[in-house]
Amino acid sequence: MDVRKLEWVLRLAVFGEFLGHGVFAVQGKAQWIGWIEEILGVDPSAAATLLMIVGVVDIAVAFAVLLWRRLPPVILLWAAAWGLWTALVRPIVGEPVWDFVERSANWGAPLALLLAYGWPKKAADWLRS
């Protein structure tokens, strides 16, 4: 098996997922603003601001994964955790559980890439590239 090809497939998958979500967030996707209002109990303006911040972070993660071959593992851990959370939000706000299931790759791809690179053994290794 060509491990470099596998790595690129995973990197492109993470890039696409985070870029897509980031662009939707920066555009202020109304449904997501409503979810933020519901979950955090904030007004629409605060929800929109938070969503904009999330979008910028998602886009930064997308490009970091695409362009930075050996990025700090904490970025991939964040991507996996954030992907899991954004998938879990669906049933939390009343969407069918299948909306969570179909988003398994949102957290699975960054987690697979992290595991392929090797799980850090020491706390300081999470920040090293």
Image (tube, helix red, strand yellow):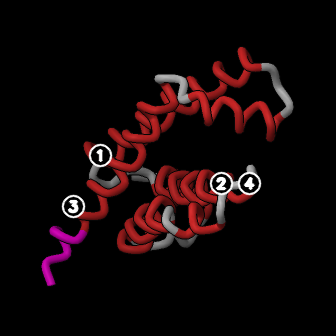
Q: Determine crowd level at label 1: few under 14, some 14-19, many 20+ residues with C-alpha closer than 10 A.
A: few
Q: Report the front residue among 63 and 33.
A: 33
What amino acid type is highlighted by mark number 3? Trp
Q: Horizontal and vertical percent for residue 72?
A: 44, 52
Q: Report the front residue among 125 and 79.
A: 79
Outermost residue toward the right? 41
Mark 1 — residue? Answer: 68
| Secondary structure category for the residue under label 4 | loop
What amino acid type is highlighted by mark number 1? Trp
The residues bearing labels 3 and 2 have C-alpha atoms spaced at a distance of: 29 Å
Q: Determine crowd level at label 3: few under 14, some 14-19, many 20+ residues with C-alpha closer than 10 A.
A: some
* Residue found 70% across the figure and 32% down from its top: 34
When the figure is inspected, residue 111 is found, relative to residue 73, above or below; the finding is below
Q: Which residues are magenta?
A: 1-6
Q: Horizontal and vertical percent for residue 13?
A: 32, 57
The residues bearing labels 4 and 2 have C-alpha atoms spaced at a distance of: 6 Å
In primary-sequence order, the first of circles 1 and 2 is 1
In primary-sequence order, the first of circles 1 and 4 is 1
Do tag 3 and tag 1 residues touch (Cβ < 8 Å)? Answer: no
| Nearer mark to the viewer, of 4 and 2 | 4
| Secondary structure category for the residue under label 2 | helix
Q: Quadrant of the N terminus?
A: bottom left
The residues bearing labels 1 and 4 have C-alpha atoms spaced at a distance of: 37 Å
Mark 4 — residue? Answer: 94
| Secondary structure category for the residue under label 1 | loop
When the figure is inspected, residue 38 is found, relative to residue 109, above or below; the finding is above
Q: Horizontal and vertical percent for residue 90?
A: 65, 54
The residues bearing labels 1 and 2 have C-alpha atoms spaced at a distance of: 31 Å
